[in-house]
Image: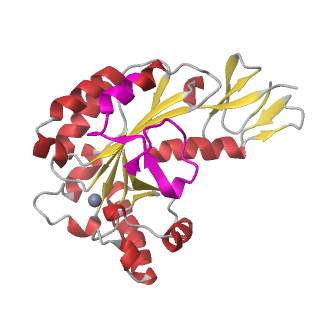
Amino acid sequence: MNKVYCCFPGGKHKVLTMSYDDGKQQDRRLVDIFNQNGIKGTFHLNSGIFHDPERIKPEEMPQLYAGHEVACHTVTHPTIARCPMPEVVSEVLDDRKALEAIMHYPVRGLSYPNGSLSQDIVDMLPHTGIRYSRVVGNTDGFELPEDPYRWMATCHHNHRLMELGEQFLSLHKQQYLYLMYVWGHSYEFDLMGNWQLMEDFCRMMGGKEDIWYCTNIQLMDCLDDFKRLQFAADNSFVYNPNARDCWIRVRNTDSVCTPAGQTISL
Ligand SMILES: [Zn+2]
């Protein structure tokens, strides 16, 4: 029987994604660094605070964040574990609505404002169309999230960034999927005077053949697409019902593209 493994697009087994909160002016410089190196990020925004002069204005967003992901960070950035649940639902849904009106695609990501969450909130989020939410903290590791609604990054950019980046680059075991996930706030680079750190990191990580550069939601969608693949019981063929191509490894050697909407022999 064919042995089949899930792969990232292009048959890759490593993925890098970035996650930055609050949508302040410094996002411009950060996006520029990402773009220069082909790195993709997710920007978690508060639609109720756009009037703050420190924040990026809605009219600039479609162009600034093109190729990246805009995601929710609630409307007003409350510590939601302390709020009544109907208020939390509004904070998330109204943020989605406002961001979707600007970006014109379904906004399905979240990061918890002030890192605040509860089990009730985790249970509620799928019902609001949210597919993942990032928590605060560092795993110092390269695992895929066990619970996407408690998704912890590999590291904040001020926590062992270059060291973990070098470790990630050296990973080569094809039998595993590896994720490096970096989070922070772009204004922290001004506060710490350490833009050079992110410039060095992105230059080191960019343009690698075995790394897929994607947004947070693209990674979730890739994993969800794989779960929808319909394999013959003996893995001799597979039907891909998704609107996107999927990549798999067969017999531990070749990576194979299963084209959207098609059945192929393995
Ligand atoms: Zn925030």
Above-or-below relation of 255 to 154: above
- Residue 31: x and y, percent? 25, 38
Question: Residue 100 sits in which quadrant?
Answer: bottom left
Colour setting:
secondary structure
211 or 80: nearer the viewer: 80
At 70% from the left edge and 30% from the top edge, which residue is drawn?
5
Instruction: Determine whether, in the image, residue 9 is placed left or right of residue 135.
Output: right
- Residue 255: x and y, percent? 66, 21
Whether residue 188 appears in magenta in the rendering, the answer is: no
Above-or-below relation of 138 to 52: above
Does any portion of residue 243 appear in the rendered image?
Answer: no
Q: Where's ligand 1: which quadrant?
A: bottom left
Whether residue 143 appears in magenta in the rendering, the answer is: yes
- Residue 235: x and y, percent? 84, 31
91 or 201: nearer the viewer: 201
At 50% from the left edge and 21% from the top edge, which residue is drawn?
171
Q: Quadrant where the N terminus lies?
A: top right
At 40% from the left edge and 74% from the top edge, which residue is drawn?
81
- Residue 2: x and y, percent? 83, 25
Instruction: Determine whether, in the image, residue 228 is placed left or right of residue 195.
Output: right
Q: Quadrant where the C terminus lies?
A: top right
Above-or-below relation of 40 to 256: below
At 70% from the left edge and 39% from the top edge, which residue is drawn?
261
Question: Residue 198 sits in which quadrant?
Answer: top left
Instruction: Determine whether, in the image, residue 251 is placed left or right of residue 188.
Output: right
Instruction: Determine whether, in the image, residue 79 is placed left or right of residue 264.
Output: left
Does any portion of residue 160 appear in the rendered image?
Answer: yes
Stretch in magenta: 137-166
